[in-house]
Amino acid sequence: MTEKRKIKNVFAQGNYNCIACSPYNPIGFKLQFYEEGDYITASWNPQHNYEGYPGILHGGVQALLLDEISAWTVYIKAKTSGVTGRMSIRYKKEVTINQSEIRLRGRILEHRRNLCILEAQLFNAEGELCAEAETTFFLFPVEKMIAEGTYPARFEDFYDE
């Protein structure tokens, strides 16, 4: 069994307000991330406020979740930062709002120079794959991100150990 290692949100300080991962955003998702082998994972409890079709989690919210797990996969597995250049989503099964938890996971498919291609997946509480995305991130030089203060100078700061 793969060890599950909690990732610390090193960005959560000051007025950091990311809708997906800030612990301070009152309408945010407050996602927490874990490293599990090749994957970065997170879970979230769907809420009625994020409904699209009655009883169904809005597809745009699903896209946001898939994009965010991709971004954190870049932070940890590519050890830099970047922005989404492209995202292709396939919705396979509806995600109902009354679920106890949905699970996300992302992994790198290909990493070359300033591009990273990732797979992101969203599973319902029963473990069924409901949506999947392939994302392409344009990567920034880590030295530049460290100098700008948008990436930690010490990669180990992502972990509490």
Image (cartoon, rainbow, N blue to C red):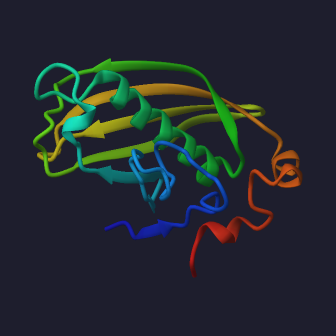
Q: Where on the picture, by quarter, is residue 64?
A: top left
Q: Is residue 139 above or below residue 86?
A: below
x and y percentages locating residue 32 in the rendered image:
43, 58
Please name the residue shown 54% across and 46% down the image.
Answer: 73
Left/right of residue 4 with respect to residue 152 in the rendered view: left
Q: Residue furthest bottom?
A: 161
Q: Is residue 107 above or below residue 133?
A: below
Q: Nearer the viewer, residue 99 or 122?
A: 99
On-image quarter of the C terminus? bottom right
Please name the residue shown 16% across and 38% down the image.
Answer: 128
Left/right of residue 114 with respect to residue 58 in the rendered view: right
x and y percentages locating residue 44 in the rendered image:
30, 50
Q: Nearer the viewer, residue 30 or 7?
A: 30
Please name the residue shown 60% across and 60% down the image.
Answer: 12
Q: Is residue 13 above or below residue 144?
A: below
Q: Nearer the viewer, residue 24 or 125?
A: 24
Q: Where on the picture, by quarter, is residue 133?
A: top left
Left/right of residue 125 with respect to residue 83 in the rendered view: left
x and y percentages locating residue 52 in the rendered image:
23, 22
x and y percentages locating residue 99 in the rendered image:
13, 45
On-image quarter of the N terminus? bottom left
Q: How many marks?
A: 0
